[in-house]
Amino acid sequence: MSLWTKDVERKFFQDTLNITTPEKLFYITQDGNFVAYWPKGYKGKKETLQSRNAFIGNYTEKWTRELLEKIISPFNAFAVQGVVCEEIGLSKRSPADIAICKTKEVIQKAENILMLIEIKMSIVWNWKFDPQTRELKCIGDYTTHQGNPGLLRSDTMLKAIGKSINIRVSSLKSSHIPIIVLGNTPITRTYYEKVDFLKKTGIIQGFYSLNPSPLDNPKRPNNIKATPQKGFVRLDSFSELREEITSLLSTDREFFLGMKPKEELGRLIELANREPTYEKKAEKFLKLLRENG
């Protein structure tokens, strides 16, 4: 089973051109070429193309859901698009892109949500389309065009982070739910420490790229495999994705974050330490933290 590739992008364009016009998917250069992105060095007249966003958003969510369904069947779970759960901040205006749930319903209770997944994917390579012959040709990776796709966009990263924080602070009912972000590009160096901190503090369990080969020249320096603390990881195979998802679904986790005087923390630790097992100690400590918040 393959992850994100040029062939997946080609299929997106081919399928979507059956239901819309080329003008909704491509920029048109001054000399009449239909391209996915403005090529680097292009000096002609430009316009902003917003119409493609909805098409690629729907396509990538469906593609990811079908990919995840091949992994989660042993957990008797379902990958559901557009999940709403008001009690943890997921409204009809801002639902989860995909949630792994115990049931198939779109309106969910927090206790039935096993994982939340934000999809931040876009067209990575540049493409040229000939409306006469219907030929679609890849003309370069993201270093050859003027666009910043996927997780390379700062606004995309900030939206994912902001939504995740909103879920975490909406209710303690979200504390058991892993949150991950799936993209199809690397991240910029300015976010290396940030994603590692988000993973370390438990706000987001990881940013992952499902694109094993985002660059035509894999030796380029920005083709990162993982950040130092693995807040970001490039997954190079379906088996790597399955391993990550299975680990997150198989392990009981609990999010906690706060600021208390050291003396009070010491007292709570001492009380929790009276429990007989590590798991019981953790449960007691978390309970005391919340009761003494």
Image (cartoon, rainbow, N blue to C red):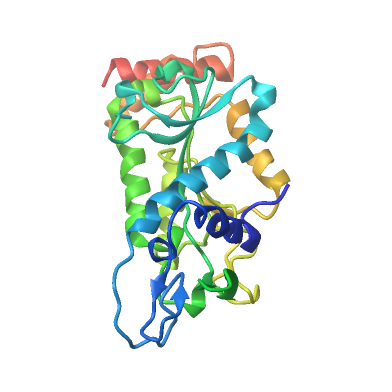
Question: Which of these two is toward me, 182 or 169?
Answer: 182
Outermost residue toward the front in this view: 132
Q: Is residue 211 left or right of residue 55?
A: right
Where residue 136 sits in the image (x, y, percent)?
A: 58, 70
Where residue 68 sits in the image (x, y, percent)?
A: 61, 36
In the picture, residue 203 is in which quadrant? Answer: top left
Where residue 173 sits in the image (x, y, percent)?
A: 37, 20
> What residue lies at 41% left-to-right and 77% top-to-bottom?
38
Q: Is residue 208 at all visible to an observer of this figure?
A: yes
Q: Is residue 206 at all visible to an observer of this figure?
A: no
Q: Please determine whether, in this image, residue 236 is positioned above or below residue 200.
A: below
Where residue 7 sits in the image (x, y, percent)?
A: 65, 60
Q: How many marks?
A: 0
Question: Which of these two is toward me, 23 or 80?
Answer: 23
Q: Please determine whether, in this image, residue 115 is positioned above or below residue 285.
A: below
Question: Which of these two is toward me, 3 or 244?
Answer: 3
Q: Please determine whether, in this image, residue 180 is positioned above or below residue 258.
A: below
What quarter of the picture does the C terminus occupy?
Answer: top left
Q: Is residue 247 left or right of residue 149?
A: right
> What residue lies at 30% left-to-right and 15% top-to-bottom?
291
> What residue lies at 39% left-to-right and 25% top-to-bottom?
174
Q: Is residue 292 left or right of residue 107?
A: left
Question: Which of these two is toward me, 215 or 59?
Answer: 59
> What residue lies at 35% left-to-right and 46% top-to-bottom?
161
